[in-house]
């Protein structure tokens, strides 16, 4: 299986050994979508060849250059699948009538289908129509998703939007002269008028309304059309993709869509809410399943190299530096981070550089999650009947679905998390950025295999499940974070009892501001009993005793009584002392950072 | 990945280059194959459609969309002035008539009886593309522009700001380790490409804008100073459209970093020649780096140094691109096959380099560029 990313193409080989599907080898080669190669299959073949070299298995036919299939003896494969986000991924323009209603539903459909939404145009987006036309003219998307009005509702607004699009004469990013595909997923009664307003300027694809009534989204048909158009129009025009499609035994899936499918499966299998994050050089993708609803957001300018300067700008220097237990001059710090931006492939050689990068990662993840929380919300514009219970419950229709107390699993991926020299560093980055409450398991995707497993799951779910469990997810352990009122440092927050099956029992008095690590090996389980202090909640309700089983991992169980939000000392000496204490508790770095 | 090292930036004494000079949309090409062009030669021109302004005539008149075509005083294709009456209702016995005036001047581009909207198209915007560098037209792309071929020195920077410009090269410092200060920029440098050394100070940047230099080329610049000069922090590394009064090319990186001796020497040798400079930078898939091209006669080719080699091998000159030896230049002395653990704890493949000051250092292979 391959995943064609914007900079590198990753290949993995999965084999059935002793009745279990396992990852056997991984290869990587530069992606070859752009000049001078302009043929994605070259990169794919190079990555496969590397897997062949590592395993000694002949995978490519030396004469035709094609894959040897089916497998026989020490050569060939039985199944070849691919995902792709190369050449800038699937770029979409979303157009809807009301920004936080139909336009937001359309944006959710596009993001769920794995697209990068380059722009959202709506009647109430505070731009004047001629500015919107200029913007559409300027963009070169792969397709447009147009939506608006419920079925049977007003047609005039969505037709006006169609006129706006037609006036701009949008052109596709790839394929020169071809017409741009436009998927119409709005009021079915307006189809004819929309079609006539758009005229010949686009390739119109009609599908069901993605918001047929205010109270319900129907995103499935629009997502399915997006995927079809992606294969028929976009992939077919991208350099070498026609040949790649011929090689594949199943349709190519946009990388984020494959990850999204996998996140849904993991949530179903683990029976809990799941948050997955992929932090790259340029962008940070967040996927979640909260309360049965899937959401995905892409923070286009939050990342660890190309976008590092933007993280610094968005978080502010104090925002980044609050996680760094040493003093650095602002001038030098800014120069170092911008040098990472212009030379993105470098790695931190000095410990202080690693600490700085991990501080940036915390802020990039935090900012991306802030955006995700706002997006992962109930449907807006829906009238709700209010009962007595609402008098005590402040959440409005805009309230986020992201309930951190109910969140059961966080999965991190991306170089800064997957390749952190110590797993505890990855665990603490995830905890500091997302600040989970109650009991939450933590894992990292060892080599970012979720995309390939997502597409494999469509044709062989059991194989994907086994590889996910055996080779993909590295279990870090479990975070236990009681939350409650702000109290003085050291005041009792909870007493914790952790009993390993057939093993020792640990009793810990957890004081406010403390971080404690209890080793518990991967694959091991322990019984956890948390007796929170008055007003504190560990997951069973304020003051209620929580009893549950927790999973171990490479880090173990992390007891976090630092409060939510994490209470950092206002003064610099106090903050530095705090950070050093926490880092020591988790044995985060090889030596004390002065 | 077997070739994970950073390929480095080009610093070449003489290279044959081809640059596409194309319009964003179809237009008229004004040059022919074989024609000799100067930087300011007009290669192609066109006009872009004017701004489109939708006017909700139905809402303005208080009529249904179907009634709009009948109430218009103008027809499709007619020109209207700003404030001119576009449509009017018949009213009651000629009274109580309502009017809709054009919010801006333009031509009526469409009339919709479905939505009651009229689209006004503003005046067309002329677009011109110039040759930017001296050379010969190698190819004409019908309706789009041409490819200009030119031979000369070619230097890539690592980061830049501002778009295309050109001017005579002038050295404002005497060594690549020198700092370009405010007094180094003189009024005589107006319209020129000014070469500095290890750093351009904030004062120098401000003075360059005041004087009106065409471009500043420097080894380094402090990110903090650049933010102060721009009035905002740098965000994502996609640049080229900034209007800062000149074009900036940084050859080494952020901070005070001596310009590579080879780069400084080459720019010095070309002093007085016309250099074409572009600051556009894009550090993502489809990397674009800023560049300086100094077209010279083909006879210079023989005298020029060989361009940088491709691979990383023992004896290869490299530049260190990350702390603790950021900016240092040296030679590869050993390629260690087994991954090594760094101070940061990361386990990566490394090499041993001997720096110009004789120090031998072990650094990650991904932290050097072949120079």
Image: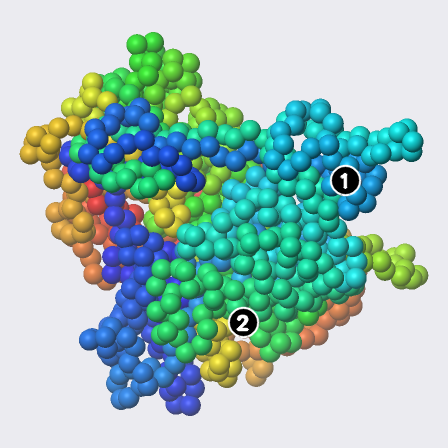
Which residue is located at x 32 percent, y 57 percent?
Answer: A38
Query: Is residue A469 visible to us here?
Result: no
In this rendering, the label closer to the viewer, 1 or 2: 1
Which residue is located at x 49 percent, y 35 percent?
Answer: B48
Verify CB contact (< 8 Å) between mark 1 and mark 2: no
Front position in the image: A171 or B64: B64
Whether residue B157 is situated above or below residue A554 in the rendered picture: above
Whether residue B40 is situated above or below residue A486 in the rendered picture: above
Chain letter of mark 1 equals B
Front position in the image: A309 or A181: A181
Secondary structure beneath dot 1 equals: helix
Residue A336 percent coordinates (x, y) = 40, 39
Taking the image as shown, residue A32 lies to the left or right of residue A6, namely left
Q: Which residue is mark 2?
A: A262
In whole angstroms, how far apart are the C-alphas of marks 1 and 2?
58 Å
Residue most extreme to the front: B93
Residue B82 percent coordinates (x, y) = 67, 24
Secondary structure beneath dot 2 equals: helix
Dot 2, how many residues are within 10 Å of its Cα: few (below 14), some (14-19), or many (20+)?
many
Residue B292 percent coordinates (x, y) = 27, 31
Which residue is located at x 21 percent, y 31 percent?
Answer: B35
Instruction: Check chain identity for marks 1 and 2: say if they share one.
Output: no
Q: Which residue is mark 1?
A: B70
Front position in the image: A353 or A281: A281
Which residue is located at x 51 percent, y 45 percent?
Answer: A139
């Amino acid at each position: 299986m391959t995943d064609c990313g914007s900079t590198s193409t990753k290949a993995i080989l999965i084999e059935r050994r002793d009745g279990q599907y396992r990852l056997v080898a991984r290869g990587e080669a530069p992606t070859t979508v752009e000049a001078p190669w302009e043929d994605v299959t070259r990169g794919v073949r190079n990555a496969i060849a590397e897997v062949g070299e590592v395993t000694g298995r002949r995978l490519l036919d030396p004469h035709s250059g094609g894959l040897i299939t089916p497998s026989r003896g020490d050569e060939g494969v039985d199944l070849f699948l691919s995902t792709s986000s190369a050449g800038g991924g699937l770029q979409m323009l979303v157009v809807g009538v009301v920004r936080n209603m139909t336009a937001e539903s359309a944006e959710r459909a596009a993001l769920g289908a794995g697209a990068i939404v380059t722009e959202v145009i709506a009647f109430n987006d505070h731009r004047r129509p001629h500015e919107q036309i200029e913007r559409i003219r300027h963009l070169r998307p792969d397709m447009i998703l147009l939506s608006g009005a419920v079925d049977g509702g007003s047609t005039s607004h969505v037709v006006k939007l169609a006129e706006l699009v037609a006036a701009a004469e949008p052109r596709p990013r790839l394929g020169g002269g071809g017409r741009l595909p436009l998927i119409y997923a709005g009021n079915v009664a307006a189809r004819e008028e929309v079609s006539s307003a758009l005229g010949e300027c686009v390739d119109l694809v009609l599908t069901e309304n993605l918001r047929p009534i205010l109270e319900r989204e129907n995103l499935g048909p629009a997502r399915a059309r997006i995927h079809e158009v992606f294969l028929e129009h976009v992939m077919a025009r991208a350099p070498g993709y026609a040949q790649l499609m011929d090689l594949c035994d199943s349709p190519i899936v946009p990388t984020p869509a494959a990850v999204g499918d996998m996140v849904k499966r993991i949530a179903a299998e683990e029976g809990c809410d799941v948050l997955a994050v992929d932090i790259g050089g340029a962008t940070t993708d967040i996927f979640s399943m909260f309360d049965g609803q899937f959401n995905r957001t892409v923070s286009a300018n939050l990342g660890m190299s190309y976008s590092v300067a933007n993280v610094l700008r968005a978080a502010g220097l104090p925002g980044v530096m609050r996680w760094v237990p040493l003093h650095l001059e602002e001038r030098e710090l800014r120069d170092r981070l911008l040098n990472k931006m212009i030379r993105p492939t470098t790695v931190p050689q000095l410990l202080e550089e690693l600490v700085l990068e991990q501080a940036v990662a915390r802020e990039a993840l935090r900012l991306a999650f802030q955006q995700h929380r706002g997006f992962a919300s109930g449907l807006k514009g829906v009238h709700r009947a209010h009962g007595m219970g609402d008098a005590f419950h402040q959440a409005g229709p805009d309230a986020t679905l992201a309930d951190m107390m109910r969140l059961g699993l966080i999965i991190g991926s991306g170089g800064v998390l997957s390749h952190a020299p110590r797993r505890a560093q990855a665990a603490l980055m995830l905890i500091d950025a997302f600040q989970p409450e109650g009991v939450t398991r933590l894992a990292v995707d060892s080599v970012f295999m979720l995309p390939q497993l997502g597409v494999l799951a469509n044709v062989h779910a059991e194989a994907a499940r086994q590889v996910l469990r055996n080779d993909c997810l590295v279990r870090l352990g479990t975070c236990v974070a009681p939350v409650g009122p702000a109290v003085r440092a050291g005041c009792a927050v909870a007493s914790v009892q952790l009993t390993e099956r057939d093993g020792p029992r640990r009793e810990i008095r957890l004081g406010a501001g403390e971080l404690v690590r209890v080793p518990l090996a991967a694959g091991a389980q322990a019984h956890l009993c948390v007796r929170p202090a008055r007003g504190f909640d560990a997951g069973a309700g304020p003051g209620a005793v929580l009893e549950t089983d927790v999973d171990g991992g490479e880090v173990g169980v992390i007891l976090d009584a630092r409060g939510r939000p994490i209470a950092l000392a206002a003064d610099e000496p106090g903050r530095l002392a705090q950070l050093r204490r926490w880092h020591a508790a988790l044995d985060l770095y090889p030596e004390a950072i002065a | 990945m077997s070739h994970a090292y950073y390929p480095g930036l080009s610093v070449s004494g003489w290279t044959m280059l081809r640059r596409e000079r194309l319009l964003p949309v179809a237009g008229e090409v004004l040059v022919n194959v074989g024609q000799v062009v100067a930087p300011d030669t007009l290669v192609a021109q066109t006009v872009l459609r004017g701004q489109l302004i939708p006017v909700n005539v139905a809402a303005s008149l208080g009529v249904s969309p179907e009634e709009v075509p009948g109430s218009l005083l103008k027809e499709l294709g007619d020109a209207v002035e700003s404030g001119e009456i576009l449509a009017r209702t018949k009213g009651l016995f000629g009274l109580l008539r309502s009017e809709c005036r054009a919010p801006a001047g333009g031509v009526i581009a469409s009339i919709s009886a479905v939505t009651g909207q009229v689209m006004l198209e503003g005046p067309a915007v002329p677009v011109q593309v110039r040759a930017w560098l001296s050379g010969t037209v190698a190819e004409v792309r019908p309706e789009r522009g041409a490819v200009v071929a030119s031979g000369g020195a070619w230097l890539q920077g690592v980061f830049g700001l501002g778009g295309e410009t050109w001017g005579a090269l002038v050295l404002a410092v005497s060594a690549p380790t020198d700092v370009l200060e405010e007094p180094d920029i003189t009024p005589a440098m107006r319209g020129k490409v000014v070469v500095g050394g290890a750093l351009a100070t904030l004062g120098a940047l401000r003075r360059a804008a005041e004087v009106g230099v065409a471009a500043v080329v420097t080894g380094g610049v402090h990110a903090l100073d650049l933010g102060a000069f721009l009035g905002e922090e740098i965000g994502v590394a996609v640049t080229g459209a900034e209007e800062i009064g000149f074009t900036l090319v940084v050859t080494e990186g952020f901070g005070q970093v001596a310009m590579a001796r080879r780069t400084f020497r080459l720019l010095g040798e070309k002093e007085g020649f016309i250099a074409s400079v572009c600051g556009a930078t894009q550090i993502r898939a489809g990397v674009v780096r800023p560049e300086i091209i100094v077209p010279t006669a083909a006879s210079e080719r023989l005298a020029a140094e060989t361009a940088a080699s491709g691979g990383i091998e023992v004896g290869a000159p490299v530049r260190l691109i990350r702390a603790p030896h950021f900016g240092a230049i040296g030679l590869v002395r050993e390629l260690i096959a087994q991954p090594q653990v760094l101070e940061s704890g990361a386990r990566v493949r490394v090499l041993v380099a001997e720096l110009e000051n004789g120090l031998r250092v072990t650094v990650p292979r991904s932290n050097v560029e072949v120079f």
